[in-house]
Amino acid sequence: MLRYAVGTFSFFHPKKKRLIIYQTPNYNNQNVPYLYLLLNLFTLSYPLFMSWDKRINYQKKWKYFFRALPIMMVVMIIWDIAFTRIGVWGFNENYTLGWYVVGLPIEEWMFFVVVPFSCVFIYEVVVYFDTRNKYEKLGKAINLVVLVVVLFLLYIGIHQMYTIVAMGFLSVLLLFHQFMYNAKYLGRFYISFLFVLLPFVVMNGVLTGSFIQGEVVWYNDVDIFNFRFFTIPVEDVFYCMFMLLFLITFYELFKKKEYEN
């Protein structure tokens, strides 16, 4: 049972066999309502500016991105809405503009456009420099290692909502790429993901409380491993990996279809 009252909710946790009480953060002494918006704009700025670079020509590939984006957003937005409603995570109103759509801050909707857009730009930079696709043979091997790690985390985190959903979704996607689909882009994806991790740590670090007082996004400790890199829950890394690999799968599919025609 979930109960909300003055920023507090409680529920019975079956594994720990006790009532869990969580107090949502309240930071009255710091109010920067445009912070999340600024993070989105900062993340978007360089990839958007460099989209017309003659080497990458990212703007010519926008059509594939904007075809794939709605498919990814359907899954991620439903997931986000559901977790927000049941209290797995939530948003600190001191760092948002206060405009909500279906229970999510408008900045969160922007996140699911801006971050994928910027990450696919990084992916295309890797594609440009890896002209011979020399990482193709490594793709399946890396994917298998990641799959084993994800399945292990899924097993030990079976009673944690965020852990089981993030690892569950990602494991299905990894299994698909490992045994059912011969994706030539898989090696490039994992190389680009390594580069994605740097801006990911900066942006997600701020969102989860690094470098600022409090958090833009808070997490219910009972639903995560509570192992964090700086302030970032480890689940966020795999959440990001699922989101981007899911997007790249359709992005590359639309590119392939056009090239074949």
Image (cartoon, grey):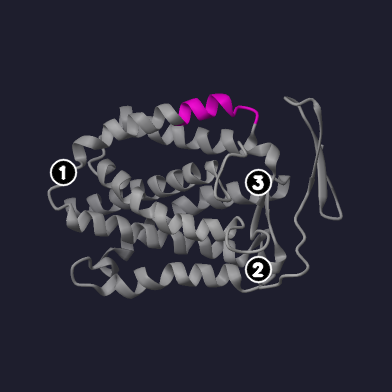
Q: Amino acid at mark 2?
A: Thr
Q: Earlier in the sequence, mark 1 or mark 3?
A: 3
Q: Earlier in the sequence, mark 2 or mark 3?
A: 3
Query: Left or right: where does residue 156 sit relative to residue 128?
Result: right
State how many labels appear: 3
Q: As rendered, which of 11 and 29 lies closer to the eye?
A: 29
Q: Residue at x 68, y 53 (%)?
A: 90
Q: Position of residue 147 (x, y in %)?
A: 40, 30
Mark 2, mark 3: which one is toward the viewer?
2
Q: Which residue corresponds to mark 3?
A: 83
Q: CA distance from mark 2 to mark 1?
A: 43 Å
**Magenta highlight range:** 150-159
Q: Earlier in the sequence, mark 2 or mark 1?
A: 2
Tell me, for residue 27, which label it has, or none: none
Decide: marks 2, 3 in contact (CB < 8 A)? no
Q: Is residue 212 above or below residue 169?
A: below
Res 144 → quadrant? top left
Tell me, for residue 96, which label it has, or none: 2
Q: CA distance from mark 1 to mark 3?
A: 39 Å
Q: Amino acid at mark 1?
A: Lys
Q: Count residues near mark 2 (Cα–Cα under 10 Å), then give few for <14, some for 14-19, many for 20+.
A: many
Tell me, for residue 134, which label it has, or none: 1
Q: Magenta includes 152?
A: yes
Q: Magenta includes 130?
A: no
Query: Left or right: where does residue 114 sit relative to residue 95?
Result: left
Residue positioned most to the left: 132
Q: Count residues near mark 1 (Cα–Cα under 10 Å), then give few for <14, some for 14-19, many for 20+.
A: few
Mark 3 lies on a secondary structure that is: helix
Mark 2 lies on a secondary structure that is: loop
Q: Residue at x 35, y 68 (%)?
A: 47
Taking the image as drawn, is residue 2 in sight?
no
Taking the image as drawn, is residue 8 in sight?
yes
